[in-house]
Image: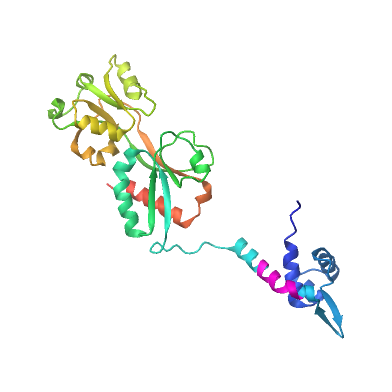
Amino acid sequence: MTDPDFNLLAALDVLLSEKSVAGAAKRLKLSASAMSRTLRQVTGDPLLVRAGRNMVLTPHAESLQARAKNVVSEMRAVLNASPAPLSLSTLEKRFTLRTNEGFIDAFGPALVNAAAREAPGVTLEFVAKPEKDARFLREGRVDLEIGVLKNMGPEIRLQALFRDRFVVALAKNHPLAAFADMSREQFVSVGHVITSRRGLIRGPVDDALAACGMRRRIAAVVPGFSAALAVARDSQLIAVVPASCLQSAAGKEMVAFPLPVSTPEITVSQMWHPRHEHELAHRWLRQLVRRVCRQP
């Protein structure tokens, strides 16, 4: 199937408005002969016929006149449309954010409250993030993905939100909570609850300990940092979690120490597909997330 030449619609609209080949040619900045060739491509109908000294539209041309004008106006509106001004007070939209539960616990309440103040008609839907995969952004199933960047593809847009580091969290009644600091020896002397979505029991902390000739005892493995905090809060185990997790309700009930071994900092970012790059509502959402995440 061959697509029609939509430039012919504009030519037809001008001709039907001018009712003159010469007048249409002048408006379109064409020669009369070029205009005639264009008209021959438009329709098999003569469109204009002589009536005395004047040219008049044929019945077929009259039936096309209003339709042609409407189509051309709509086509120009589509091609030349500029985004409507964003009105947050009347915006009604659901945004889907794909992130882990640790981010929701730490920033979800502040993010929801800030969105409700600025755009009460907006709904924030948080969905689980069992693995890192760019297809959710590419397929338009989520508006934002929040987490640590890893092989998301060259077209995915990225903005850093904050840098995070791992800390040690333990219950307030834990024997080590009374100390001013935590040594490596103390760190490996007690059981640990660790976080792994895939059930792995070795990570950067274990590599750093091995470099010092040490290892820790893993007593429990849970799928998320929130679960790790919950287990550590009600047991004699300690958890290693990102410092941002301490902003959650469970985190505020814990005692925290710097990690006694060196591990790389992590950068938490928000990611989106280029289709949303210039969408005003989406831009507002990105700015809101960035602002909330950077609050003290």
Furthest residue in direction top, as rendered: 213
Left of 104 or right of it: where is 150?
Answer: right
| Residue 255 part of the magenta segment | no
Nearest the viewer among 212 and 186 is: 186
- The colour scheme is rainbow
Give the residue displayed 46% in from the left and 47% down from the top.
Answer: 143
Q: How many marks?
A: 0
Give the residue displayed 45% in from the left and 56% down from the top.
Answer: 281
Report if residue 294 is visible in the image: no
Residue 182, x across and y down, in percent: 19, 25
| Residue 63 part of the magenta segment | yes
Nearest the viewer among 22 and 65 is: 65
Q: In this view, does 54 lie above or below 266?
A: below
Q: Is residue 136 above or below residue 201?
A: below
Q: In this view, does 79 lie above or below 183?
A: below
Decide whether the magenta segment is chiefly helix, strand or loop. Answer: helix
Tell me which corner region of the image, top left, top right, bottom left or bottom right, holds residue 284: bottom left
Furthest residue in direction bottom, as rendered: 52
Left of 174 or right of it: where is 113?
Answer: right
Residue 63, x across and y down, in percent: 74, 73
Give the residue displayed 23% in from the left and 19% down from the top.
Answer: 188
Report if residue 254 is visible in the image: yes
Residue 218, x across and y down, in percent: 28, 20
Left of 18 or right of it: where is 105?
Answer: left
Tell me which corner region of the image, top left, top right, bottom left or bottom right, holds residue 197: top left
Give the residue displayed 42% in from the left and 51% down from the top.
Answer: 95
Q: In this view, does 260 lie above or below 15?
A: above
Nearest the viewer among 39 and 44 is: 44
Tell me which corner region of the image, top left, top right, bottom left or bottom right, holds residue 10: bottom right
Q: What stretch is highlighted in magenta?
A: 62-71
